[in-house]
Image (cartoon, grey):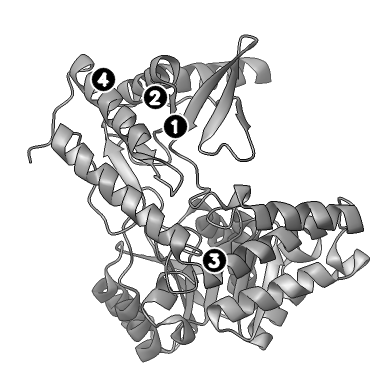
Amino acid sequence: MDFETHFSTRLAALKEEGNYRVFADIERRRGAFPTAGRHRDGEVQDVTVWCSNDYLGMSQHPDVVGAMVETVQSCGTGAGGTRNISGNTVHHLALERELADLHGKEAALLFTSGYVSNWASLSTLGSQIPNVAIFSDEKNHASMIEGIRHSRADKVLWRHNDWRDLDRKLHAAGDRPKLVAFESVYSMDGDIAPIREIVEVCEAHGALSYIDEVHAVGMYGPRGGGVSEERGLAHRIDLIEGTLGKAYGVVGGYVTGSTALCDFIRSFASGFIFTTALPPAVAAAARASIAHLKGSGQERQQQRARVAELRAKLDRAGIPHMANDSHIIPVMIGDPVKCKMISDILMRDHGIYVQPINYPTVPKGTERLRITPGPLHGTAEIDHLVGALSQLWAHCALSRAVA
């Protein structure tokens, strides 16, 4: 086989479809977020970032930066290997205690990313619980899908956020062990699951409940424990999975649950056992971020005000965006070529960075710009964004929303 020709042909097809991914060369600047520098052709262009998952700007917070710098100075840069080989550092253990407290659980377990925590945990539970069937929401994240597939457990898809469909399918499974996996906030549409109804169905059928709160931790609840905390349901969910790389502004993933559940995953998950641990400085910075957001609601309140302001101005301009109750604003375009073109023009001519979201991340025909306003965006920046989008809507002959 001519491998190089195969690679080139497939890449050319992606480009022709408008689905080839181009990553912007961005330089983040401490203290300047959401402004960043875009490097291209030897020049640097100032741009405003509108698509970051650093939802609250916590990567810039002095407490978080200070904790990381101080720990690098005291501990060095790396963990020295897996925790199995190099041992636990005090910073890993302190962070796990902080996370367990955040969700009201007995224990927590750190991973190197949210993707890995989902993949490793679901693959371990699916492979190590005899005859288990995993019931997965049809819009679950790729990390959950891959973990379930790797487990080789029987998988049953249920209609997105349809707890009645889940109830029927759990009933049909009889007495075998069952695990239900779903998310709280779905990252592309921004919709929020009916968590109470799902949990009640799990309890009725004796199913283990597994919720992914990666787009909600830090963002919802009086202490940032996610939608499950906001709705008073965290204590009824067996396993809560989250990330440190979004609202907390660092990197890493985790699961929380009972002592036995976390120890079970720690003892059997290859994705934990054989992976180098997070650097102690990262753990210290994450702990500082979580501790701050447990006591401060200011960032969440400002962020929600910016979301409401942007939605209202998009409505007035007739720019169609998907309605939801979360902080994610999907501006719908519905064409991959136009979606990328609008993104490119926004960056080039207006200094606005918002990445196009095309297939396979979203279904064909639902291409969009995924906008995530944060507390550090201002009214002038919102007006600039809406004005630029309005110009491009006319330029591309896209349909306006009817107020």
Mark nearest the camera among 1 and 4 is 4
Circle 2 residue: 343
Amino acid at pointer 2:
Ser
- Marks 3 and 4: CB-CB under 8 Å? no
Circle 4 residue: 392
Q: Is residue 267 visible?
A: yes
Instruction: Say which quadrant the N terminus sits in.
Output: top right
Q: Is residue 130 above or below residue 356?
A: below
Q: Going from the N terminus, do you reach mark 1 or mark 4 first?
A: 1
**Local crowd at mark 3 within 10 Å, few (<14), some, or many (≥20)?**
many
Q: Going from the N terminus, do you reach mark 3 or mark 4 first?
A: 3
Find the distance from the CA under tag 3 to the CA under tag 2: 32 Å
Q: Is residue 153 visible?
A: no
Q: Is residue 395 above or below residue 72?
A: above
Circle 1 residue: 355
Q: Going from the N terminus, do you reach mark 1 or mark 2 first?
A: 2
